Image: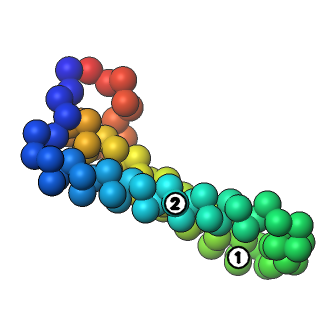
Amino acid sequence: MHHPVADPQLLQSHLDVAIVSIDRLSALAGLLAVEDVAAAFARLSLLEQVAIFGGFEADLHQARVALLRAVGNERGPHARFNDT
């Protein structure tokens, strides 16, 4: 069983990292939901589109690692939330 981080400052630090990552993802998703932006995205080169999705992936990974650390999961970024 995993135990949440005992130090409130460390817990808040992990949660802050997750929140910033999620906010960035939300902002980018919001932009891509605008018709003109979606059309501009479609005109980007494949390499440029891949770079944008690479940013999505990096932010998701960063949020996941921060949340795993916040709940005290020391098994690393490949662990699942329900791992025991």
Q: Is residue 42 visible?
A: no
Q: Is residue 18 visible?
A: yes
Q: Is residue 51 above or below residue 6?
A: below
Coordinates of residue 4 in the picture (x, y in percent) = 20, 34
Up/down of 4 relative to 41, above or below: above
Image x and y of residue 64, in percent:
40, 47
Element type where label 1 sits in the image: helix
Give the quarter of the figure containing the N terminus: top left
Image-based side of 32 in relation to 53, left or right: right
User: Looking at the image, is 23 positioned above or below residue 47?
Assistant: above
Give the left or right position of residue 72, taking residue 82 as reference.
Answer: left
- Mark 1 / mark 2, whichever is N-terminal: 2
Say left or right for 13 vs 51: left
Q: Inspect the image, locate mark 2, and give the three-letter code of the amino acid beneath it.
A: Asp
**Residue that numbered label 1 is attached to:** 47
For image coordinates 79% across by 79% down, the residue present is: 45
* In front of the other: 76 or 20: 20
Quadrant of residue 37 within the rendered picture: bottom right
Residue that label 2 marks: 23
Q: CA distance from mark 1 to mark 2?
A: 24 Å
* Mark 2: secondary structure: helix
Rendered view: 5 above or below 39: above
Query: Residue drawn at (32%, 24%), measured in percent from left and top?
Result: 83
What is the image's colouring? rainbow
Number of residues whose C-alpha sits closer than 10 Å to that of mark 1, classed few (under 14), some (14–19) or many (20 or more) = few
